[in-house]
């Protein structure tokens, strides 16, 4: 079992049972968002967690050290060149002393869980890819959400995935999927996917109650939060940008871990950068909701 190094304010908050929200670092690195939007994303997510009463804990591997919470003078490193690190890559990043292993959802959950954190916020989770029959590509995020004892807060799965199959996979894995004041699975850039979530919740207390009542305490819960209405993109524009991006990925033979960063960059280019403010808005909103949930979880523990 790895023992991540906790930032002092994170260690203190956890020790005192105060709310903490873990964050992934891939979204803030050059793999997730173009500069300078990535800095804005980091600043807005951190501020949203703090404004809603929790302590933010950005996860990363820096110089081979697994970290939960980074200091302000390390932010430039989080915004820079990174090696994408899923949970399975963490031991390698440690053993080989990677300068910056940027955590995906699965890696962030692994580090946050080792630190004893109960709530994690991201933008969109990985899921079952549309070409799964050919490629077998199912994100390790899904297994990690199922097998670490945290609430993952997201704006659904990224729209270029097969959302129906992603929901089926989560059902098989035994993950309760909750819709935040919404009946449909959000589709990241848009509020609705046409697919119903199994359960709708209205409050952070309700989410904390679900977490507390799990049949297997070692497992996780997924909370899906739609992008705020004002920031939603036009579904038609997104659909054609997605189709083009996926066709390009296939034509260029992009595979494995490279698919998601490639497709995100193409969508940003195809929407003339319109996808970027939407991405920032949903990430910030998820961080705010996650902080509310963390506050509710920690007040149950008192
Ligand atoms: N959502 C974004 N930007 C990202 C990702 C998600 O808007 O960069 C990242 C997350 O870190 C997620 C990862 O865990 O993509 C999933 O990658 P893959 O599909 O290779 O499992
Ligand atoms: Mn994959």
Image (cartoon, grey):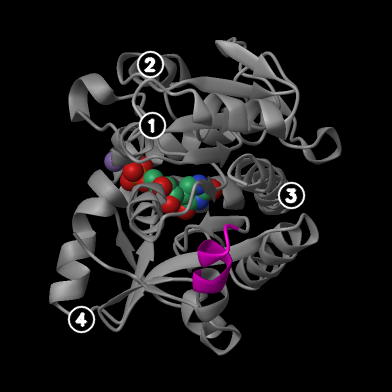
Instruction: Provide the residue span drawn in magenta.
Output: 11-17
Q: Secondary structure at mark 4?
A: loop
Q: Compared with residue 203, is residue 266 higher up or lower down, i.e. above or below?
A: below
Q: Which residue is mark 1?
A: 127
Q: Is residue 116 left or right of residue 254?
A: right
Image quadrant where residue 144 sits? top left
Looking at the image, which is closer to me, 253 or 33?
33
Q: Which residue is mark 2?
A: 165
Between discs 4 and 1, the one toward the N terminus: 4
For residue 71, the mark is none
Between discs 1 and 2, the one toward the N terminus: 1
Looking at the image, which is closer to me, 202 or 241?
202
Q: Which residue is mark 3?
A: 281
Residue at the spot 41% in from the left edge and 48% down from the top edge = 105
Asked if the residue under mark 2 is in contact with the one under mark 1, i.e. CB atoms within 8 Å, the reply is yes
Numbered disc in front, either 4 or 1 = 4
Between discs 2 and 4, the one toward the N terminus: 4
Q: Is mark 1 within 8 Å of ligand 1?
A: yes
């Amino acid at each position: 079992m790895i023992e991540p190094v906790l930032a002092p304010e994170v260690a203190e908050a956890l020790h005192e049972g105060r709310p903490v929200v873990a964050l992934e670092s891939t979204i803030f690195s050059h793999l997730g968002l173009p500069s300078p939007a990535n800095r804005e994303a980091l600043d807005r997510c951190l501020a949203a967690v703090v404004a809603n009463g929790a302590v933010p804990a950005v996860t990363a591997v820096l110089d081979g050290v697994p970290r939960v919470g980074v200091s302000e003078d390390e932010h430039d490193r989080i915004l820079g060149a990174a090696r994408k690190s899923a949970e399975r890559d963490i031991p390698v990043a440690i053993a080989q002393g990677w300068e910056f292993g940027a955590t995906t959802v699965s890696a962030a959950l692994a580090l946050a869980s080792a630190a004893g954190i109960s709530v994690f916020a991201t933008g969109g989770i990985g899921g079952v890819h549309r070409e799964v029959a050919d490629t077998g590509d199912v994100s390790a995020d899904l297994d990690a959400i199922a097998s670490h004892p945290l609430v993952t807060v997201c704006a659904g799965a990224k729209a270029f995935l097969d959302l129906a199959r992603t929901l089926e996979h989560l059902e098989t894995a035994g993950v309760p999927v909750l819709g935040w004041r919404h009946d449909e699975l959000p589709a990241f850039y848009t509020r609705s996917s046409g697919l119903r979530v199994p359960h709708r919740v209205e409050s952070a207390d309700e989410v904390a109650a679900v977490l507390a009542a799990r049949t297997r305490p070692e497992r996780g819960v997924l909370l899906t939060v739609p992008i705020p209405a004002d920031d939603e993109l036009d579904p038609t524009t997104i659909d054609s940008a997605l189709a083009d991006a996926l066709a390009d990925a296939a034509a260029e033979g992009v595979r494995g871990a490279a698919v998601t960063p490639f497709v995100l960059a193409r969508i940003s280019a195809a929407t003339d950068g319109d996808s970027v403010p939407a991405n920032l808005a949903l990430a910030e909103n998820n961080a705010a909701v996650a902080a509310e949930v963390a506050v509710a979880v920690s007040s149950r523990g008192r």
